[in-house]
Amino acid sequence: MNKLIIVSAPSGAGKTTLVKELMQEEELKLMFSISAASRKPRENEINGKDYHFLSVDNFKEKIKNDEFIEWEEVYNNQFYGTLKSEVKRVWNLNKNLIFDVDVKGGLNIKKTFPENSISIFIKPPSIEELKKRLQKRGTETEESFKKRIEKAKFEMTFANEFDVTITNDNLKKAIDEIKKVVGNFILKQEL
């Protein structure tokens, strides 16, 4: 049975870094779930590799046609979601699917696939550290920065709804921990 690994966190907590590390573990047979997004690509992002970039109208059309497992209007007219076709694509390759999704999306995927998924919440050491990480990125306007911090505070209230919480206060330790958790989930159930 194919597995789903759901990794969620507030923006800046380090989930993308941890997911990239997990992807290096060949025995886990992981394939990244490419989310759909209605925002413009950032520098170096490639359509179909980093995200399926859709127009707002196209995204809304796919919602209407029930083409998503989960979707969210994260900010006004800024949608993210997981296409049903993406799950089929990866499972047809006999791979386990790994998601790098926001908190609500992660919880929705877990509800849809409760038996063959594990949900992992990546927690930043503190809101102050999260602020530093987001400022270091240099990709936010002052307004979007404030929105992300408020959203992060809200998202952290959902940590206890996930199967596992990993605090990313030391990157090497967090990498070791997530590899152990995911390895145990995938490999023990294959035996």
Image: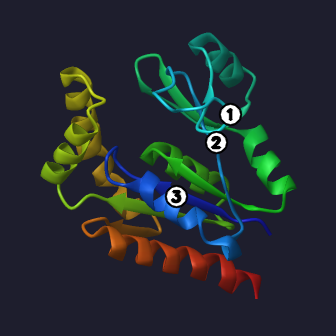
* Residue for point 45% across, 61% down: 18
Residue type at mark 2: give it. Ile
Residue 152 position within the rendered picture, expressed as x and y whole percent measured from the top left: 28, 44
Q: Secondary structure at mark 3?
A: helix
Q: Secondary structure at mark 1?
A: loop
| Disc number placed over residue 137 in the picture, else none | none
Residue type at mark 3: give it. Lys
Left or right: where does residue 174 sit relative to residue 132?
Answer: right
Residue 3 or 169: which is nearer the viewer? Answer: 169
Left or right: where does residue 72 sit relative to residue 142?
Answer: right
Determine contact: label 3, label 1, CB under 8 Å.
no
- Mark 2: give few (<14), some (14-19) or many (20+) Cα within 10 Å: many
- Mark 3: give few (<14), some (14-19) or many (20+) Cα within 10 Å: few
Determine contact: label 2, label 1, CB under 8 Å.
yes
> Residue most toward the front?
44
Q: Secondary structure at mark 2?
A: loop
Quadrant showing the C terminus: bottom right
The label nearer to you, 3 versus 2, is 3
Chain-order first, disc 3 or disc 2: 3
Query: From mark 2 to mark 1, how far is it between C-alphas?
Result: 7 Å
- Mark 1: give few (<14), some (14-19) or many (20+) Cα within 10 Å: few
Residue 180 position within the rendered picture, expressed as x and y whole percent measured from the top left: 50, 80
Quadrant showing the N terminus: bottom right
Residue 29 position within the rendered picture, expressed as x and y whole percent measured from the top left: 72, 68
Residue type at mark 1: give it. Gly
Q: Which residue is mark 2?
A: 34
Chain-order first, disc 3 or disc 1: 3
